[in-house]
């Protein structure tokens, strides 16, 4: 019996591409989110399955590696599967293909929460859906670490206010939007001169509509670390590696 894998092909609209006609990092997260949703739905723990129970999955980490840029006109096939949970962490891996070529790899970690109290739940809360889930141990990529170092000597790049268009059904900024927030910390000239090798986001606290966000950046030898802050508190962290 073959191991479980959800495989879905996607048409990529023009809006998924940047000024270089390359797939935007936020678009890769969008595709991963769509693939995760399709997989969770067919395994019985999708949004529609969990909402009546008052449960939901909240993403806590994303790590993405580009093997090469995905260019305008190409189609992507996403493959994804859930790994066996470790305590409160549900890890999921994704392979992005153009034809038979792997062009990107993604790993994400999620937590199952009670949507009223936001307390963390163990996998057993899902009951039979968890016990019969065809978890798969294979990993396509391994982040250097799930934790991102804090910005120590960064500078403020810009400020923004979270709008309704940034938010999803959990009433806070959607995880894919943060990639745009963070890559807006760089100029077109900087991004034109560099190739994105990998990036990572840690989602600490929610950014809700009306929050004024401060984006700070600190350069490193091989890229940069950035943070989203609100009222002096760090909400979300980011790291990028350039080739």
Image (tube, rainbow, N blue to C red):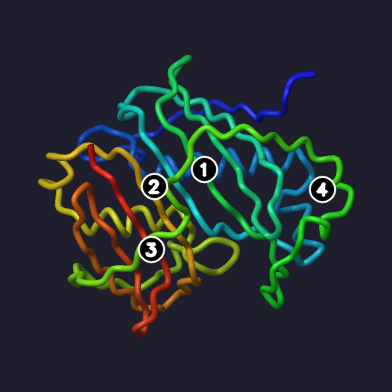
Question: Mark 4 falls on what kind of element?
Answer: helix
Question: Mark 2 falls on what kind of element?
Answer: helix
Circle 3 is placed at which residue position?
Answer: 237
Q: Is residue 165 above or below residue 22?
A: below
- Any mark on residue 130, and which? 4
**Percent position of residue 38, x then y:** 65, 39
- Any mark on residue 55, and which? none
Please report whichever mark, 2 or 3, sits nearer to the chain's N-terminal start: 2
Q: Is residue 10 above or below residue 172?
A: above
* Residue pictured at 83% horizontal, 57% vertical: 124
Please report whichever mark, 2 or 1, sits nearer to the chain's N-terminal start: 2
Evaluate if marks 4 and 3 touch, with contact meaning CB atoms under 8 Å apart. no
Q: Quadrant of residue 185?
A: bottom left
- Cα separation, mark 2 vs mark 4, equals 30 Å
Label 4 crowd bin: few (<14), some (14–19), many (20+), radius 10 Å:
some
Q: Quadrant of residue 70?
A: top left
Circle 2 is placed at which residue position?
Answer: 26
- Cα separation, mark 2 vs mark 1, equals 14 Å
Circle 1 is placed at which residue position?
Answer: 107
């Amino acid at each position: 019996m073959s191991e479980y894998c959800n495989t879905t092909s996607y048409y990529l609209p023009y809006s998924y591409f940047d000024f270089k006609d390359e797939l935007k990092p936020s678009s890769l997260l969008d595709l991963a989110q769509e693939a995760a949703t399709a997989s969770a739905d067919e395994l019985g723990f999708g949004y529609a399955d969990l909402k009546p129970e008052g449960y939901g999955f909240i993403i806590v980490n994303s790590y993405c590696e580009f093997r090469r840029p995905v260019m305008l006109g190409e189609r992507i096939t996403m493959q994804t599967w859930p790994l066996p949970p470790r305590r409160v962490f549900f890890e999921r891996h994704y392979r992005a293909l153009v034809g038979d070529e792997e062009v990107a790899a993604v790993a994400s970690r999620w937590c199952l929460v009670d949507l009223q109290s936001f307390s963390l739940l163990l996998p057993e809360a899902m009951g039979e859906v968890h016990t019969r889930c065809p978890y798969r141990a294979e990993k396509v990529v391994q982040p250097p670490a799930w934790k991102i170092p804090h910005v120590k000597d960064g500078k403020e790049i810009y400020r923004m206010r979270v709008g309704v268009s940034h938010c999803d059904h959990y009433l806070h900024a959607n995880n894919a939007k943060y990639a745009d927030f963070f890559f807006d910390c760089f100029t077109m000239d900087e991004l034109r001169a560099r190739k994105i090798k990998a990036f990572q986001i840690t989602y600490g606290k929610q950014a809700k509509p009306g929050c004024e966000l401060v984006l700070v950046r600190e350069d490193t030898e091989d890229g940069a670390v950035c943070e989203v802050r609100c009222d002096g508190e760090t909400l979300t962290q980011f790291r990028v590696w350039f080739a």
